[in-house]
Image: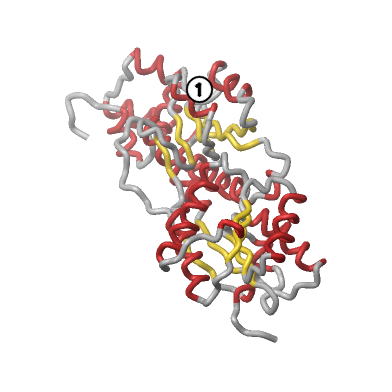
Amino acid sequence: MKKEKITIDDIAKELGCSKSTVSRALSGKGRIGDEMRKKVLSCCEKNGYKPNVIAASLAKSKTYNLGVVIPADENINTIPFFQNCLMGVCEISNHLGYDVVVITIDAQDISQLEGLVEKKKVDAVILTRALVDDHAVAYLRKQTLPFILVGGSAHADILKLDSPHVEACRELTSTLIEKGIRKLALIGGNMQHVVSQKRYQGFEEGFQKNGMSVQKNLVYLNCNTNTAVEQAVESALREGTECLLCMDDRICMQVLPKLARERIVIPRNLKVASMYDSFFLQNYHPAVTSIHFAEKELGREACRRIVDKLEGRGQTEEVPIGYHIVLRESTSIRTY
């Protein structure tokens, strides 16, 4: 390595590690093995690298912690998205030398997030749910701490990443219509969640793609309780629906037992589909047609991007977050 001025980037490249690894080795803070620390110090000595005093001071103020914020919903343990997204974050953060601090917040109470930021416990924050009136986003936009939102937002100035919900739900809706279904009912959740709005937009566009309009009497939104979901099912059945399309797997897991109690045979008497896949729906009998999103990859990519921002790297080429429609027995045209 022959340069007049050696930088931390040069040391990292020579050792084949990240800048954060070199920083931790030099600052003596953070999680790093003795062997790697010795390699870094040896490389610095060999190349005559002397850390800038100010840069070293800044490095020592780093925690090498990433804050991951998940909703404090009572039923959060039944929603696999957050678990899978968190697993993706942890996988990449571990590789890049960062630890993860997980907190929960309520839509109206973000005090845990405020405490995390004000006590300087983390270097950056990953938000895993986007809301229409998002107090967490509003708060973080006023801070200097980097953050990324997993979800959609009207704010063009923030770092964000999302699955293609509109496109996926448009395709699923259109596919069901093309299978001959005309009375398609939608049971949806909290419309204050941006993801719910995007899925509904895709639902409408699926009808438009086929030259049809949504039948408003078969749309049931803000079904946030089991009672509301069951009432929606009863109403849809009275309206003669041919297929119940659930906005997510949690709603679908409430719909299926209700249909079983009503002695409705799927798919002979009624078809069922979900705008979000899960292990439960894959293994239900009959298995439920769903949209499978790559939520773990979403977590991985969110972590990569926020660490890139933290370490001063330009944004790498975007990795498309994919999906695929999984047609299963619950929407089969076969009768038995």
- Horizontal and vertical percent position of residue 53: 34, 13
Q: Is residue 259 above or below residue 101?
A: below
Q: Is residue 128 above or below residue 320?
A: above
| Residue 333 seen from this side | yes
Which amino acid, mark 1? Tyr
Looking at the image, which is closer to me, 41 or 54? Answer: 54
Which of the 4 image quadrants contains residue 254?
bottom right
**Residue holding disc 1:** 139
Query: Which residue of the protein is positioned furthest toward the right in this rendering?
Result: 261
Q: Residue at x 41, y 36 (%)?
A: 154
* Viewer-side residue, 123 vs 275: 275
Corner quadrant of residue 274: bottom right
Q: Are there few (<14), some (14-19), or many (20+) residues within 10 Å of tag 1?
A: few
Residue drawn 48% across the image and 74% down it: 178
Q: Quadrant of the N terminus?
A: top left
Give the position of the C terminus as an image quadrant: bottom right
Q: Secondary structure at mark 1?
A: helix
Residue sitting at 54 percent across and 21 percent down?
117
Query: In the picture shown, does residue 328 fall above or below 190?
Result: below
Q: Indicate left or right for 306 with 32 as reference.
A: left
Q: Residue at x 63, y 71 (%)?
A: 242
Can residue 33 be seen here? The reply is no
Q: Position of residue 331 (x, y in %)?
A: 60, 74
Please state the horizontal and vertical placement of residue 82, each as a whole percent of the image: 60, 45
- The image quarter in which residue 278 lies: bottom right
Residue placed most toward the observer, 237 or 143: 237
- Residue 170 is situated, as x and y percent measured from the top left of the image, at 45, 60
